[in-house]
Amino acid sequence: MDGDAASVQQALSGGDVHELLKVWEDFNSGETWREVSATGSDQARAAAAQFLAGVREVAALEALRANAKAVELLTARRWYVIKSAREAGATWAQIGEALGISKQAAHDFYRRKIEEQEKHLPDLHDAAAARAVMED
């Protein structure tokens, strides 16, 4: 469907993480229902056909591109959530645990992101406030 391709391309070219995750979910839902359609009972195949008629068609490579871009966006935005967690009293160990990394890795990630903000967006970034949460 041309509309499907256009909406997928729009999501891939934009920066809306929700749209990117929707592309990912549409692909996965479609794959699940195609499997049901191929292996299910007559009733299951009928339900699958009905679902597939209404779901956006997404190619596997498009789903992978959406996944990669969503991960990139979420990771890029992680630093300010770390800042909020620190301001709320979370320790680096707690932040590292929440992210599945060591406290040192969490601290290093945050420090690098702050340095990037200072380098690339010095006029839009409050470096002092960002650095204030770095120490225990």
Image: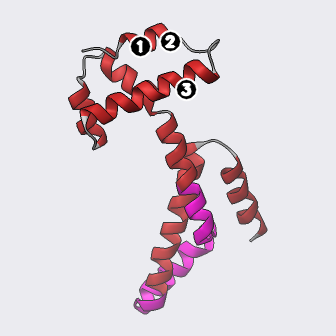
Query: Few, some or many C-alpha atoms within 10 Å of disc 1 (few <14, some 14-19, many ≥20)?
Result: some
The image shows residue 30 at horizontal and vertical percentages of: 53, 72
Please, is residue 97 above or below residue 58 in the view? above
Q: Nearer the viewer, residue 23 or 87?
A: 87
Q: Residue at x 49, y 68 (%)?
A: 29
Query: Few, some or many C-alpha atoms within 10 Å of disc 3 (few <14, some 14-19, many ≥20)?
Result: few
The colour scheme is secondary structure
Q: CA distance from mark 2 to mark 1?
A: 6 Å
Q: Are marks 2 and 3 in contact (CB under 8 Å)?
A: no
Tell me the tag on residue 131. Answer: 1
Q: Residue at x 25, y 32 (%)?
A: 103
The image shows residue 72 at horizontal and vertical percentages of: 53, 45
Q: Are marks 2 and 1 in contact (CB under 8 Å)?
A: yes
Q: Is residue 66 left or right of residue 131?
A: right
Please, is residue 63 above or below residue 77 in the view? below
Task: Tell me the kind of residue under disc 3.
Answer: Glu
Q: CA distance from mark 1 to mark 3?
A: 13 Å
The image shows residue 84 at horizontal and vertical percentages of: 37, 20
Task: Tell me the kind of residue under disc 2.
Answer: Ala
Location of residue 83 (image quadrant)? top left
Location of residue 90 (image quadrant)? top left
Query: Few, some or many C-alpha atoms within 10 Å of disc 2 (few <14, some 14-19, many ≥20)?
Result: some
Tell me the tag on residue 116. Answer: 3
Name the N-terminal-most of marks 2 and 3.
Answer: 3
Segment tinted magenta in the rendering: 38-67
Tell me the tag on residue 127. Answer: 2
